[in-house]
Amino acid sequence: MAVVVQNIRRADAALAGAFAEFGVATTHEAQGRTGLLAPHLTPIWPGAQISGTAVTVSVPPGDNWMIHVAVEQCRDGDVLVVSPTSRCEDGYFGELLATALQARGVRGLVIEAGCRDVRELTAMGFPVWSRCVSAAGTVKEVLGDVNVPVVCGGQLIRPGDVVVADDDGVAVVPRRDAATVLDACRARAGTEAASRTHYAAGELSLDLNHMREKLADRGLRYVDAAEYDAEHED
Amino acid sequence: MAVVVQNIRRADAALAGAFAEFGVATTHEAQGRTGLLAPHLTPIWPGAQISGTAVTVSVPPGDNWMIHVAVEQCRDGDVLVVSPTSRCEDGYFGELLATALQARGVRGLVIEAGCRDVRELTAMGFPVWSRCVSAAGTVKEVLGDVNVPVVCGGQLIRPGDVVVADDDGVAVVPRRDAATVLDACRARAGTEAASRTHYAAGELSLDLNHMREKLADRGLRYVDAAEYDAEHED
Amino acid sequence: MAVVVQNIRRADAALAGAFAEFGVATTHEAQGRTGLLAPHLTPIWPGAQISGTAVTVSVPPGDNWMIHVAVEQCRDGDVLVVSPTSRCEDGYFGELLATALQARGVRGLVIEAGCRDVRELTAMGFPVWSRCVSAAGTVKEVLGDVNVPVVCGGQLIRPGDVVVADDDGVAVVPRRDAATVLDACRARAGTEAASRTHYAAGELSLDLNHMREKLADRGLRYVDAAEYDAEHED
Amino acid sequence: MAVVVQNIRRADAALAGAFAEFGVATTHEAQGRTGLLAPHLTPIWPGAQISGTAVTVSVPPGDNWMIHVAVEQCRDGDVLVVSPTSRCEDGYFGELLATALQARGVRGLVIEAGCRDVRELTAMGFPVWSRCVSAAGTVKEVLGDVNVPVVCGGQLIRPGDVVVADDDGVAVVPRRDAATVLDACRARAGTEAASRTHYAAGELSLDLNHMREKLADRGLRYVDAAEYDAEHED
Amino acid sequence: MAVVVQNIRRADAALAGAFAEFGVATTHEAQGRTGLLAPHLTPIWPGAQISGTAVTVSVPPGDNWMIHVAVEQCRDGDVLVVSPTSRCEDGYFGELLATALQARGVRGLVIEAGCRDVRELTAMGFPVWSRCVSAAGTVKEVLGDVNVPVVCGGQLIRPGDVVVADDDGVAVVPRRDAATVLDACRARAGTEAASRTHYAAGELSLDLNHMREKLADRGLRYVDAAEYDAEHED
Amino acid sequence: MAVVVQNIRRADAALAGAFAEFGVATTHEAQGRTGLLAPHLTPIWPGAQISGTAVTVSVPPGDNWMIHVAVEQCRDGDVLVVSPTSRCEDGYFGELLATALQARGVRGLVIEAGCRDVRELTAMGFPVWSRCVSAAGTVKEVLGDVNVPVVCGGQLIRPGDVVVADDDGVAVVPRRDAATVLDACRARAGTEAASRTHYAAGELSLDLNHMREKLADRGLRYVDAAEYDAEHED
């Protein structure tokens, strides 16, 4: 049953790489608030902001053999995505695998499990988003799959999809939506820049976005503290 | 039912701001070990140490509309406190709202939910204490309340109370206790400085605080390892 | 029943200190993938890498009295290990106790509970691995034990054992195994350096470690994406 | 600082008792979706459905002394509410305290901590809603407070408030709102009975509550599976 | 973007229903140890064992509007599967919706969120597998999707797939694999019955499954306790 | 390194079995509030109350091979104790292994991982205390150890120790302390019976245990609600 799928179709490399500039929050919003991985996947060091094409790995609990198999399937501009078949916090990944991946141009790792060698990975500048940091060693006995669809952080990720990751977490963009979503990112970034200027000048979103009427329609009431306290006096 | 309470009574601004110097642990101890928010509220970047007056917001799950409403109620020296009506990890807050708050002199945010744009908030120097980091977008459809008492991190926080936050977490001081607790903070800081000098010189709290007799009264026994091992040999 | 065991046998000081160079992951692997504490014990500031001999403390929930008692039992090269008798997140430990320990040459603290004064401990360079950061104050009313075997992070730690801690977490090496495991660390570090060179040059672990045949024997199948997609078409 | 507040004002006994018939979900809805304690407070045995007036206890971690103190403050129709000052899972409460409370007519316990003697409490018919079941023993050394406002399950509970608990969890109704909320419960129960009849007959809430137009206005689109699949074909 | 997909292809009704006899563990094993939802999805009452065809619903946090929309899409033999777009513990579902579903022949609910009215659902015999029990009310303001692929309990579930649920949890079988996996279930059940007889007679799996040689090959060593203790003496 | 230790010394069978009558809470108290396993180990069905001698198994994540090995080491009156080397929630154990153990007179299982076949285990009357219920299948590839000391639920358990388990959880009594602790259980049970009679008659522990003076010494203050409210008025 175990399979390594080769010659996957990847999102266009230039498109995939362009998401890094916009980051996770903008990407997630730009595709209609979808594609965000759960927040328990956190960066092991702050400041990295990457995007690339997913190579996916499904691994058994406590066994990192298939990550070794997956290295060969990676190429420049990829992001490795690893998910165990049941909850596991072991340290599947460390500096040696990172060295092998970095040599192939892989931009980072997203893993629904543990990672180790944090100091070395930080020094190498190899970013990892993981469930936890753990030095727990793994074995190489049981097969899994490479480049099959996996669920990671509660999102379906297919090989070749775009993965975006930064200090806010990780998002996935389906391969064929990459161009559309990237355009939407650009549009959103423009809008946000305009909003930022207004807000910095002390303007209110209540006014800029004409919220006051809708708030009143829904029944929002403004009261003075003295009045409120009197109503709620014991 | 939704209400925005205006013109709240705030703790004195100078008092409220003075707690930052002492920080969370000292404030918590100084008011009799009360007022500490639960430790799952952690800073998104290290090193911030603030205090100010609470503006409170009660929000529905996945809806940040009332934070937009609350901005207008904030003024220089405030700290925004946001709590959802049921557990939620969405990213209610990011750099745009922070820009708006910073323009009004707000010192930081405490939120029993998620926060996003960590990189930008760090660059802006706007501190946030949150349950998690999450880019998950929210909607603007359901009302909540501004400046009503909320429970956040397991503590009751009323509008106008003093909120203190640093790398150790967050504490609240009831508005009318601010002066008393601040005095107690000063006294405690003095005592601790003295203790620090003694400890740095190698003196023991056992002696400084006369604990030995009380320990003996309670029945503490000193034994040699050889004796203990013999007793516990299998 | 409460006892302070004195004059414990410690692992050789030079041996105990030598583990710091290798760190947690190597130590854990070198002793056959044993001795690793659970990953919820995390450093309060990044970059510390220590090893030393354990002085152990068993404390009641919410009571740090026995840590004060334990200070006197510590000496140069020790690492304090504290575990509560039931789950507790209170801030048992802060800068004053750290000052006292640092004055005695203690290298750090491992605590299955909370820690406070993160800013001050960071400034002092006193490293702590804890379950959480919490400013919650504790009392001094109930006895516990010093230098008895404790379970911390799911591992049995005996007084005098070697404790190793870094950004990856914490590991324990039984006292009498220290020399053997240290030798194994050195051997492993050599092997890893060689692997690193190969990987950096783009060689694959599949080839270096002769995995291909074993993978084929277990039934791993390589297929082309087009073929795989055709098989899985809906 | 520790205090026992006596002669608290309780919600009217008949009102307080009448909520049991409606249960937690109806009560929570009837007061505008407020007052619900967090879902980690679960019943130790299924089927109990109670309501009564709160006697509150604030306890230190690992210390149940104040529960003993609180027994004397309880009377017929009360529900004891216990909350530790920091997270604790110890078994503060068992069959002996339940026997004492049952002798005074107390209807049950809500505790933000552990409970033990599940078998005996089940046999006695004494219901408990707790964070967990734990046999961990507690001490009697440190004071706390009886009949002060406490936060339990993320809700503020004042002595004399109405507490409602059943298989769905626990809710609190402020003392002075008891009559109003009880009326709302009755109204809601009537509406729900009508809805139940319609639904059992196969009618749809889409029609009964005229949702179709609003759904269309918001942009809901109905498509055939074949069409949808064609749109999403890879 | 919100869509209701109609006229989905469902797994054959007889096939889908036949899995109930075998239950979750056998189904999961029979399809190669895949398709199991995470164990935090637990039954609200013990003893139910069902299978049927999935109708899926993607809902916003705190909003159950789309469940009302989904009722109309359900028919005899279905199982409703609901997943929020971000973590939520609210009580999306209770007895009124269950009444509506039961009237249409729906066999149960799987929900990655909260459920309420446990007592009534138990009395009705309507089974639910949920993340938690919570009475927290939800609103009807924000759209979602019906009959699109969802991730629930870490597994991808497509409309029309087979869902199996019992006291062990929940499993999903892809629609087109239903016949094959059902055959494998039958085969496995036969094998297990044979094993059960052997084990009940005191035979050992070590012998029945010829494990001894493989264990020895891997290096398993049998030692006497006296010998082991001597080796590990301190 | 993997080892099966044979011919372990067990606590006396009659002693070991006698703890079941007293249960977990009494045993834990009787040995000085020690030996209690963490409360996340819960029974899969209510009402079982057992005690016996521990046969211990250390297993890799996701691999139950060593449980098969351990069956042969079990005999009448034993309780199997299984702990994975890193956190794992897989379903290591089900009805077939239970059948094999029951045939040998084993009284139950304590497992720091998942368990499956809850319905069948309940029907068989084979009790299990586990971290969770999960049908996740395991492999048989990697060795572990049988009858070595393990940490389970945060407690050290040695082969031959007494394990006690009931609806309150699990406790361990060191083999050589069995007789002493059993005596203490009997004494405690007597005392509790006396207390129960007093409490049922409405007497207060405050009086029976002469707590009032100690409470006053510590500074407990009794105030009237009216007075308290006046002090705390806003």
Image (cartoon, coloured by chain):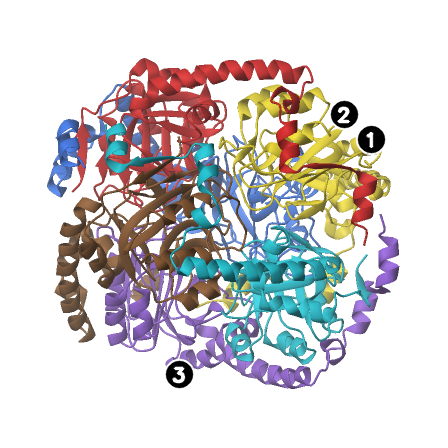
Chain colours: A brown, B purple, C cyan, D blue, E red, F yellow
| Circle 2 or circle 3, nearest the eye | 2
Q: Amino acid at mark 3?
A: Ala
In which image quadrant can residue D98 be found? top right
How packed mark 2 is, by other alpha carbons closer than 10 Å (few <14, some 14-19, many 20 or more), is: some
Residue labelled with disc 2: F76
Confirm whether residue A220 shows in the render. no
Q: Amino acid at mark 1?
A: Ala
B201 in relation to F55, above or below: below
**Which chain does the numbered disc 2 sit on?**
F
Name the secondary structure under disc 3: helix
Q: Amino acid at mark 2?
A: Asp
Point 44% across, 14% down: residue: E186
Are the residues at dot 3 and dot 1 in contact (C-beta closer than 8 Å)?
Answer: no
B91 in relation to C106, above or below: above
Q: CA distance from mark 3 to mark 1?
A: 71 Å
Name the secondary structure under disc 1: helix
Q: Evaluate whether label 2 is on the same chain as label 3.
A: no
- Comparing E62 with F19, the one in front is F19
How packed mark 1 is, by other alpha carbons closer than 10 Å (few <14, some 14-19, many 20 or more), is: some
In which image quadrant can residue F92 be found? top right
Quadrant (top left, top right, bottom left, bottom right) of the C terminus of chain A? bottom left
Q: Residue D11: image x %, image y %?
A: 48, 47
| Circle 3 or circle 1, nearest the eye | 1
Residue labelled with disc 3: B14
Residue labelled with disc 1: F13
D204 in relation to A112, above or below: above
Are the residues at dot 1 and dot 2 in contact (C-beta closer than 8 Å)?
Answer: yes
